[in-house]
Amino acid sequence: MTVTESTTDVVIIGAGPSGLMAALWLARCGVKARIIDSRATKVFRGHADGMQSGTLDIFDSFGIAEDLYKKSAQALEMTFWAGGKDSPLKRVARFPKWYPELGQYRLVHTSQGNTERALLDGIKAFNGPEVERGVTAAAMDIDESKISDPKAHAIKVTVKHLTEEELAASSKNDTVPRPGDFNYDPADEPYLKRRASGKEGTTEVIHTKFVIGTDGSRSWTRNALGFEFLGDETGDDSVAGVLDCVATSNFPDFHIQTMISKDGRGCGFVPRENGLTRIAAPVANRADATPESIIKSLKEIISPYEINVTKVDWCGVFGSRHRVASSASKHSRVFLAGDALHIHSPRAGIGMNFSIQDAYNLGWKIAHVVKGISPLNILKTYDEERGLTTKQLIAFDKALAEQAPLGGNFSVKGTRQGLQDGLPFTSTTAIEYEAGPFVAKGDGSITSKQHLAPGLIVGRRIPSQTVEKHANGEPHDFGKSFPSDGRYRIVIFAGDISRPEQLRRVERLSQVLELPETFLQHSNGRAIFPQDVFETLVLHTASRDEIEITDLPPFLFKNSDPVNQVFVDNNDSRTWTLSEAYSKYGISRDTGCLVLVRPDRYIMYIGELEDITELIKLVASVFI
Amino acid sequence: MTVTESTTDVVIIGAGPSGLMAALWLARCGVKARIIDSRATKVFRGHADGMQSGTLDIFDSFGIAEDLYKKSAQALEMTFWAGGKDSPLKRVARFPKWYPELGQYRLVHTSQGNTERALLDGIKAFNGPEVERGVTAAAMDIDESKISDPKAHAIKVTVKHLTEEELAASSKNDTVPRPGDFNYDPADEPYLKRRASGKEGTTEVIHTKFVIGTDGSRSWTRNALGFEFLGDETGDDSVAGVLDCVATSNFPDFHIQTMISKDGRGCGFVPRENGLTRIAAPVANRADATPESIIKSLKEIISPYEINVTKVDWCGVFGSRHRVASSASKHSRVFLAGDALHIHSPRAGIGMNFSIQDAYNLGWKIAHVVKGISPLNILKTYDEERGLTTKQLIAFDKALAEQAPLGGNFSVKGTRQGLQDGLPFTSTTAIEYEAGPFVAKGDGSITSKQHLAPGLIVGRRIPSQTVEKHANGEPHDFGKSFPSDGRYRIVIFAGDISRPEQLRRVERLSQVLELPETFLQHSNGRAIFPQDVFETLVLHTASRDEIEITDLPPFLFKNSDPVNQVFVDNNDSRTWTLSEAYSKYGISRDTGCLVLVRPDRYIMYIGELEDITELIKLVASVFI
């Protein structure tokens, strides 16, 4: 048998949504990575279908949200119906699943196939690696003598490139769509089958600096690390059959995400892209989750309403178990993310979102270590930050499970409350990391002045507001100024710079940045230019008739473009309200403040304009 | 010489924006048409660049606005600068060029080449005719004995298919972009050169029912009809050189549409798509409108600010003359539209918009005559409606010319007032047709009850508002429910149908529509089905928890889809305001009203729900 050897910086094992997000981040940051997957193709139909506001925001920050969003079904509200032997089915609750504070994107539902395609297209756009399909991991060895040297290829991953025969034998029967098939999307064309690599039938030893295991609930990586997958064995064993189909129905809320309970059994509808509907209905066991039994089960519950299924697109089964890996990483060299790290029930449609966001938290940090910007020890923050969200995720799901057993009778009040009150959490827009190297709050030596911007929470993502471009008065979604490109952003809320003393504060801030000892200059010697790691944004409140862009210190825009860096929150010249960023963020329109935003768009620090010195110290603490 | 004969329903002479809009409408309505143009290709660069809100709305109603809009530069505001020998240049005015009442689309600027491509792509999408390039009209004969028979091919148009040599000799030197050229757009690929038709060098006699002359200011069609082109010979003879270029400048408002006046001379900037800027500056005469002299003239005016032009994309010259054809049509068989009908100055960036909207007014009317829906005499309304707007257009331009001579010193106050107060007119969103067969107001036998919906003006386009889809609560831009598909829309503002007496009013309305003698049934005998000519929309104010779609009379949605026809304006279940259509339209939330909207989205009639009988009479008056 041929054995070849190779080196790379990062190996990603598993090309589901989480693994693809890791690959996308690394591609965006220009880090060498490989991504392997044992299956022959991506997913095309069914599977996880909930795309939450916060995840869409992240996709948008890579420029891959628009098409996916447009082709998805929006879930603006949810209804509950209940009935029984003596009482006809009736609507018992209706509540919104989105409101503007959650962000610009509404919750949508679409096949996981479409989400994977958006990620794959993004990886391609940033010249990232093609997924190596039909490749299985066989062994992993960590050379512990090298793990403290960030430059060392301390890990050996042995992979097997399956032959076509081996691949065919191991492939699931998730059929590949063909032109003319229902739900065939021409955009899937590049991903319909694995590309011949010439390595089929060979074994390859890959020497790598880092490994990311995103290989699902039965994770090979997790087992190879010897980690346990801990959960409640005595928990809820109920399963629900899930059917994505085309159907017509006289059920009044057939076009709304809805849950229906009758005689102790529960079912639901989720409107989906392309005229599809996802049906969830109780089945006796996993083997019984056939289209026929799901439809039969559903019909019994929604009677006297009727449904006519004309086309089955995908059929699956969802369970209720909770499990969490005993650790999220080993030696800050091998990391687990997504289902490899945590599984739970599909009740709130958030699993894929948390999985993707595990990788979103991790990707830029690994990139910064590989690029020599940050030391190895920053990678511990992955375990801390995503360990916290994993705990919250499982706790949320358990609480919801008590109110709404899968396929069973649900508590209208409790389920509604769980889902509605949980929106900030489930939308992932209010995820809040605790104090740490990248979250300057609490008792640390450098701590934020949170009161300067109560609408911007240190440890949370930066929410967007509409502002105007100073250069041309064009309304601008401020969130779009935080693309996921691997850079930190120093946001100077400059306040009313038409007042000379306030302008002078900004000038002094710029002078500090210009000092040779500040970090902006530091990295020059290492072929990493400050503008590769930082961008400065200015949002002021002065009238554009009293201040020009050229009145601002030019150093702030060195080597870049003030047209796209200077914004204004001032509606004096409009008869209609456009921008209210300062008031929503709770920042003083006179004196402003200073905000540091991480490459993953979480808020790292808030201070006064004079606190630029503190900000520099903070950044120095996470830099080499 | 070979002479062939052929027949069609409509011949369009001239494939500029106006002719293309005519072809698009006819394609959308399924009417046979041909469109010829003497030039070898479409326009690719420069020319008319202002796309107004109302025109973008129309494009949207054909599904062709989105890409064009996204790739254009928005003009949200305008500034004026003034200075002289003793006073440095300074900004003397800033005012908005858009506000929400004008519609969802803002004024944008983009090359006429992009506008033409959007129209061409739309024609293709609706299986319309390809433009026959290098084809010139040579003769036109109207058989007056046949002009009262709508089915008669009463016109003979003789056209000459140029050989490649003839075409090359007659072609202007507007170069065709090639891959790699600046501003080359791959989307132009299908339109880079004329397709061989096999008819080159032959003469063809086309027997047609109608002719639309959209062949520009030197219109062959207008001359063939013997019409004069009347104007003010003694008027403003000044010209401005126009340069589309890539440039950098330290002029503070370089990214804003701006006019600058110094020492009695005036120039301006218009930010454009793809990083281009349009420069307008005075030149001595038409021959002097070279890039060099335009840049020189500009530099003198904007000094001490500087500009560095790095790439010239297009250079042209604009004049100030006003002229109007002595008639807009002959025998309701041959029509003039666009520059063939009226020319004026480019001051307000509206010329192309009025030209396109001439054709938008005409296209569906000709289609309805050809399809046997309406009698020939409805075509007189083209002359009446567009005759009125032509008069308004010339008057507006003349008034503005007095304030702002081309290339000269402008009155800040007067120009600003003209441009700002004129926005409803120039945006084309407040164009109002007078009483006539398609505008039931004033003294007619059937007249609207305008007071029932003061926010919907009879004779104006229907403004959009956000509403919700009853079926799923999804926010919906109500304007999108009025696509340009050739159908009238009966909009039932059903009011609060949770009140039984109000629901009964809607039921009675439906019963009237169901009567065999109403027009909805009439057309059945003529292979034109009611649903081809009408669509019913319902917008009610009841809570979706008190009324279901199935409570509405099913006849209203016969052969169609209530999911996309029933809307609600009720925010009771939201914590945030979403829909305010009734209040903006000024309609009673209790009792509602009835509105008839023409195929071109102008409001034809407003009445009570019981006035459905009047509405039917009105429609009967414009139907065969």
Image (cartoon, coloured by chain):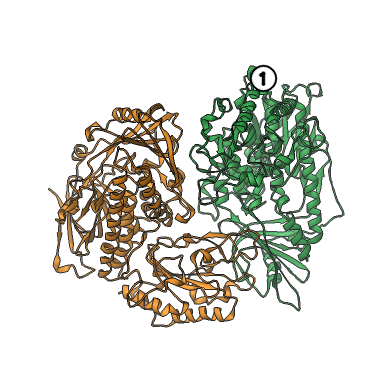
Chain colours: A green, B orange
Residue at the image position 82 percent from the left and 57 percent from the top: A236
Residue A355 drawn above or below residue B580: above
Outermost residue toward the right in this view: A234
Q: How many marks?
A: 1
Residue at the image position 30 percent from the left and 62 percent from the top: B385
Q: Residue B525: which quarter of the image? A: bottom left
Relative image position of residue A108 (x, y in whole percent) = 62, 53
Relative image position of residue A36 (x, y in whole percent) = 66, 36
The C terminus of chain B is located in which quarter? bottom left
Residue A359 visible? The answer is: yes
Q: Residues within 10 Å of mark 1 (few under 14, many from 20)?
A: some
Residue A208 visible? The answer is: no
Out of B409 and B371, give the one closest to the viewer: B409
What residue would you read off at disc 1?
Answer: A522
Out of A564 and A582, give the one closest to the viewer: A582
Q: Residue B300: which quarter of the image? A: top left
Secondary structure type for disc 1: helix
Relative image position of residue B191 (x, y in whole percent) = 34, 43
Q: Chain of mark 1?
A: A
| Amino acid, disc 1 | His
Outermost residue toward the front in this view: B86
Residue A535 drawn above or below residue A295: above
Residue B365 drawn above or below residue A529: below
Relative image position of residue B205 (x, y in whole percent) = 17, 55
Outermost residue toward the left in this view: B1
Q: Residue A12: which quarter of the image? A: top right
